[in-house]
Image: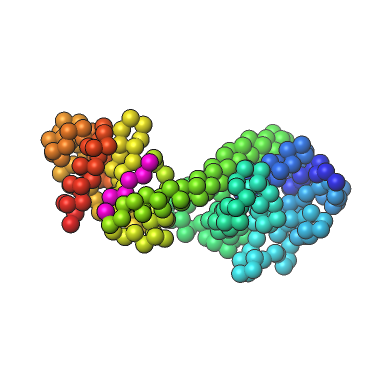
Amino acid sequence: MTITHLITHSGGFHADELLSSVVLTRLFPQADLLRSRDRQLLTPGADKIIYDVGGAYDLAAQIFDHHQRPGPLREDEQPFSSFGLIWAHYGRDYLTAMEVPADQIAAIHHKFDKNFVLPIDLLDNGAMEPSVAGPLSILTLPTLLGSLKPVFDDTSPTANDDAFFKALPIARHFVEAQIRNLAAKARAVGIVEAAIAKAGTSPILELPMGMPYRSVLDQAEADHILFVVHPRGDDWTLGGIKLSGDTFDQRADLPAAWAGLTDAELEEASGVQGAKFCHNARFIAVATTREAILKMAEIAVRECQ
């Protein structure tokens, strides 16, 4: 039977049912999304998906709640929120609807679950403290989405629903951007692998365009590569390689003498005609031509050895 109703609870909202709604409304765009605690509406039916409310996790009845005791657990016994449950059962269909290639769906489903869905699940269940984000805790996605709820003295009877439906397209942008980025990383793998092979023993990796590359470098154990060059618009860029995604430290920095310089000053400091810009933090430089950027890369390599 066709799904005609997507039902979650009324009142205040959290990231888990909001993000669940992102997935379900893409898969069932003609269904009515309702926010209610009315028992009649929450009676299971073949035409309904009920989530983050309903007091049960019952796949056959299409109820995806996690507030009951005992709550549903992953294989590693970490708790699900409604988002984790919806992603587990509908995530692959969602990726298909997002036009992710079939041979990438399993890997992207797993990566998105691990890096995006699981933290939402843990925070929603109180299994992770917001303090793990330190001073950035106010900038986590659940907090940002939560900030879209109505203020305490908004007395409009539709305030919560109005805020939920305004927040929904914002949440959708975050989910879709993450999926597009994961798919892009998968597309980049072959290109980066070919570039690494072409570089051989050179410490300079040349790519045909800007793209995700660091995870491929790590997997290839290409530790000898210190800098990456690629075209960007009418210019060319030279960049350092971060040691990991958790730090700004690099395998090698650009020369200290270049830091913060532009145009003629950078040309004089580097000795390279066409040198255009070097960031003060020495992680990226720009030149007008491929020849100039490769010269800058060679100089950077010599100075860091």
For the C terminus, the quadrant is bottom left
Tag count: 0
Magenta range is 202-208
Which residue is at a point 18% across and 46% down the rendered structure image?
A: 299
Q: Quadrant of residue 32?
A: top right
Which residue is at a point 86% across and 50% down the rendered structure image?
A: 45
In this orientation, which residue lies closer to the viewer: 24 or 195?
195
Which residue is at a point 24% across and 51% down the rendered structure image?
A: 253
The colour scheme used to paint the residues is: rainbow
In this orientation, which residue lies closer to the viewer: 248 or 290?
290
The percent coordinates of residue 232 (x first, y second) are 35, 35
Which residue is at a point 61% across and 37% down the rendered structure image?
A: 169
The percent coordinates of residue 19 (x first, y second) are 63, 47
Q: Quadrant of residue 158?
A: top right
Q: Is residue 170 visible?
A: yes
Q: Quadrant of residue 57?
A: bottom right
In this orientation, which residue lies closer to the viewer: 20 or 255?
255
The percent coordinates of residue 171 (x first, y second) are 59, 42
Residue 81 left/right relative to 43: left
Residue 266 left/right relative to 227: left
Asked if residue 139 lies in the magenta stretch, the reply is no
Q: Is residue 248 visible?
A: no
Asked if residue 203 lies in the magenta stretch, the reply is yes
The percent coordinates of residue 191 (x first, y second) are 43, 48
